[in-house]
Image (cartoon, rainbow, N blue to C red):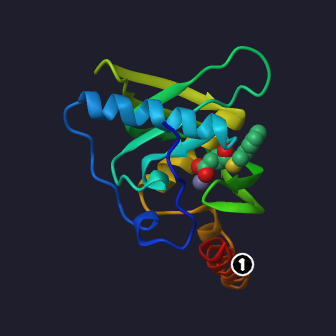
């Protein structure tokens, strides 16, 4: 099922999300819905708070061409970050049509639980590294615009408030 994506500003996007306890059929269904919602958008990642569920679950697929590589990460944690940084022009499905350069560690090592309950650890680089950091930020109530200066952030927030008013009227 495709779920509606929350648009900034929304208090649910500012919350520090709760860890997932047991991986129940509801959590597996949420992950499946999030992947469907992400592919439909289209996007390369999605975090549970973006569909209004404040739990620590993210999905990603950064393969732009070729066989898809869907991933669902429960309780993801960055256990190591590289000193070298990389800059990427980021977007966000909760902040449509706004993009800005964000500088982040170029490589990260992440530990998480898969949907079968197994512990996983993997090093991410390139777009995967940017995306996993962007998605884990969502779980901590942080958006890519929080890395920008106050004027740019306020300008984008005002545009999103206007977009939400227009969508509510339509
Ligand atoms: O979390 C999100 O809002 C999803 C976001 C992830 C992301 C994008 C760019 C850098 C870091 C994280 C998106 O997927 S925005 C859409 C997007 O990037 C895209 C859409 C279609 C094809 C390729 C990329
Ligand atoms: Zn986002």
Q: Secondary structure at mark 1?
A: helix
- Quarter occupied by the C terminus: bottom right
Q: Looking at the picture, does residue 44 appear above or below residue 101?
A: above
Q: Looking at the picture, does residue 128 appear above or below residue 41?
A: above
Q: Residue at x 72, y 78 (%)?
A: 159
Q: Residue at x 19, y 32 (%)?
A: 22
Instruction: Write down the quadrant of residue 117 in the picture.
Output: top left
Residue 91 in view (yes/no): yes
In the rendered image, residue 31, in percent from the top left (x then y), is placed at: 42, 33
In the rendered image, residue 101, in percent from the top left (x then y), is placed at: 77, 59
Q: Nearer the viewer, residue 110 or 63?
A: 63
Instruction: Write down the quadrant of residue 76 in the picture.
Output: top left
Q: Nearer the viewer, residue 8 or 140?
A: 8
In the rendered image, residue 62, in percent from the top left (x then y), is placed at: 68, 31
Q: How many marks?
A: 1
- Judged left or right of residue 34, residue 104 is right
- Judged left or right of residue 79, residue 170 is right
Q: Residue at x 62, y 30 (%)?
A: 61
In the rendered image, residue 98, in percent from the top left (x then y), is placed at: 76, 64
Q: Which residue has dot 1 on it?
A: 159
- Crowd class of label 1 (few under 14; some 14 to 19; many from 20; radius 10 Å): some
Residue 82 in view (yes/no): no
- Judged left or right of residue 163, residue 9 is left
Farthest residue, direction left = 22
Farthest residue, direction front = 170
Residue at mark 1: C-beta within 8 A of ligand 2 = no
Q: Nearer the viewer, residue 165 or 84?
A: 165
């Amino acid at each position: 099922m495709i779920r509606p994506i929350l648009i900034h500003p929304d208090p649910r996007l500012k919350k520090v999300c709760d860890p997932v306890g047991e991986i129940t059929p509801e959590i597996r269904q949420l992950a499946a819905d999030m992947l469907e919602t992400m592919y439909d958008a289209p996007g390369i990642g999605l975090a549970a708070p973006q569909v209004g569920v404040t739990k620590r679950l993210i999905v990603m697929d950064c393969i732009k061409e070729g066989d898809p590589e869907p991933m669902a990460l429960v309780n993801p944690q960055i256990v190591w970050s590289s000193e070298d940084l990389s800059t990427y022009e980021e977007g966000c499905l909760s902040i449509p049509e706004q993009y800005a350069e964000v500088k982040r560690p170029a490589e990260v090592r992440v530990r998480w639980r898969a949907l079968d309950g197994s512990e996983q650890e993997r090093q991410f680089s390139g777009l995967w590294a940017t995306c996993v950091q962007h998605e884990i930020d969502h779980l901590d109530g942080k958006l890519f615009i929080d890395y920008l200066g106050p004027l740019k952030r306020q300008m984008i927030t005002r545009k999103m408030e206007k977009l939400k008013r227009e969508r509510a009227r339509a």
